[in-house]
Image (tube, rainbow, N blue to C red):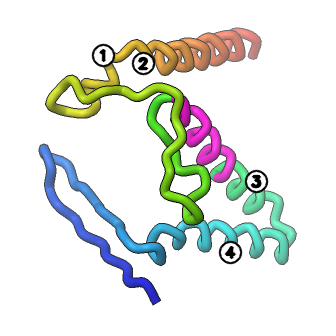
Amino acid sequence: MPTCSISTSLIEGGISITITGPTCRSFGWRLLGATLLLALLLRSRALALAASSFVGGVFLHLLLDTPFAGIRWLYPLSDHSYYLVTVPATRSWWVWSFVFHWTFLFEIAICIAALVVFIIRRRRS
């Protein structure tokens, strides 16, 4: 059986947690599956809604990251990352490389659209 390795370290004032090994990577999905199964068995709408919202958020995140960040959609069957645009490492910290790349405008557009929807809905109620 594959091993699970969890390590923590302090990086730039924050904590970095690294989880390696197939057992660890799939633990979250197993936990989510157990939660969904429990919701079905208990017929709990609240638990099912919470689990479905989580899964929806995860897949929306993956979908939005695919064009620019690369996502391993076929994992664990394949380690190939799928993406449309490669953001080159032009800065010392990878985040700045992304912020100063033209693809970051899509992230800004998503945030502006969310803010507009929030303001419109708030004015209606």
Distance from label 4 to label 1 (Cα)?
41 Å
Residue 109 in percent (x, y) is at: 53, 13
Q: Is residue 41 left or right of residue 103?
A: right
Question: In the image, is residue 108 above or below residue 75?
Answer: above
Picture disc at residue 34: 4
- CB atoms of marks 2 and 4 within 8 Å: no
Mark 4, mark 3: which one is toward the viewer? 4
Picture disc at residue 100: 1
Q: Which residue is mark 2?
A: 104
Distance from label 1 to label 3 (Cα)?
37 Å
Chain-order first, disc 4 or disc 1: 4
Q: Which residue is mark 3?
A: 49
* Amino acid tagged 4: Ala
Q: Residue at x 36, y 69 (%)?
A: 20
* Amino acid tagged 2: Phe
Distance from label 2 to label 3 (Cα)?
31 Å
Q: Nearer the viewer, residue 110 or 64?
A: 64
* Residue extent of the magenta highlight: 55-67
Question: In the image, is residue 100 above or below residue 62?
Answer: above
Chain-order first, disc 2 or disc 4: 4
* Amino acid tagged 3: Leu
Task: For mark 1, give the secondary structure.
Answer: loop
In the rendered image, the residue lying farthest to the bottom is 1
Residue 56 in percent (x, y) is at: 68, 46
Q: Residue at x 13, y 46 (%)?
A: 13
How would you rate the neighbour count of disc 3 (Cα within 10 Å): few for under 14, some for 14-19, many for 20 or more? few
